[in-house]
Image (cartoon, rainbow, N blue to C red):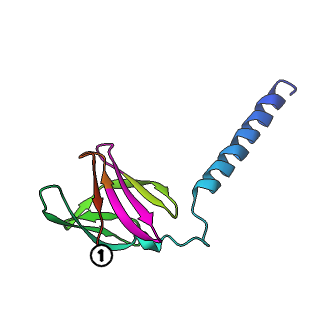
């Protein structure tokens, strides 16, 4: 029994630490991230107009094509997705509204318009 006690104690502490880390990553209900939701437009470097849609469930649609992503980060300044190829798609906020969209695959940052 004495040999198992350190293992049980260690496992309990790891579970508690993991729980606290996961709880910290989840957005609190008092913070409002709705500034990222909605339809946005941006021009690429060839001046072609594109649309970007963020739904209430944080799904992403670009030019009417759903993009398979996972939500990596969400705070009052940034919304970060990772696409199925491992690239990051980042929305940045300024002055309490979405301002820029960064596409890591193209290594381009686009100004957003609504």
Q: Secondary structure at mark 1?
A: loop
Residue at left 39%, top 68%?
A: 98
Q: State left or right for residue 66 relative to residue 37.
A: left
The picture places residue 97, in percent across and down from the top left corner, at 42, 71
Could you tell me which quadrant the C terminus lies in?
Answer: bottom left
Q: State left or right for residue 110 relative to residue 78.
A: left
Q: Would you place residue 2 above or below residue 37 in this image?
A: above
| Residue, far top | 3
Residue at left 76%, top 30%?
A: 7
The picture places residue 9, in percent across and down from the top left corner, at 80, 36
Q: Would you place residue 10 above or below residue 71 in this image?
A: above
Observer-nearest of 43 and 105: 43
Please tell me how crowded label 1 is: few (under 14), some (14-19), or many (20+) other residues with Cα within 10 Å.
few
Observer-nearest of 75 and 7: 75
Give, as a single range, the part of the protein colored magenta.
82-101
Q: Is residue 76 magenta?
A: no
Could you tell me which quadrant the N terminus lies in?
Answer: top right
| Residue, far front | 95
The picture places residue 30, in percent across and down from the top left corner, at 62, 73
Residue at left 39%, top 72%?
A: 37
Q: State left or right for residue 85 relative to residue 37.
A: left
- Quadrant location of residue 99? bottom left
Q: Which residue is mark 1?
A: 114
């Amino acid at each position: 029994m004495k040999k198992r006690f350190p293992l049980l104690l260690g496992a309990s502490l790891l579970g508690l630490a993991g729980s606290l880390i996961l709880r910290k990553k989840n957005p609190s209900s008092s913070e409002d991230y709705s500034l990222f939701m909605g339809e946005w437009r941006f021009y690429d470097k060839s001046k072609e107009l594109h649309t970007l849609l963020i739904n209430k469930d944080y799904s992403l649609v670009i030019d009417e094509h759903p993009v398979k992503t996972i939500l990596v980060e969400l705070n009052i300044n940034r919304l970060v997705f990772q696409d199925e190829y491992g690239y990051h798609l980042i929305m940045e906020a300024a002055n309490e509204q979405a301002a820029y969209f960064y596409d890591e695959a193209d290594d381009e940052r686009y100004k957003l318009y609504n």
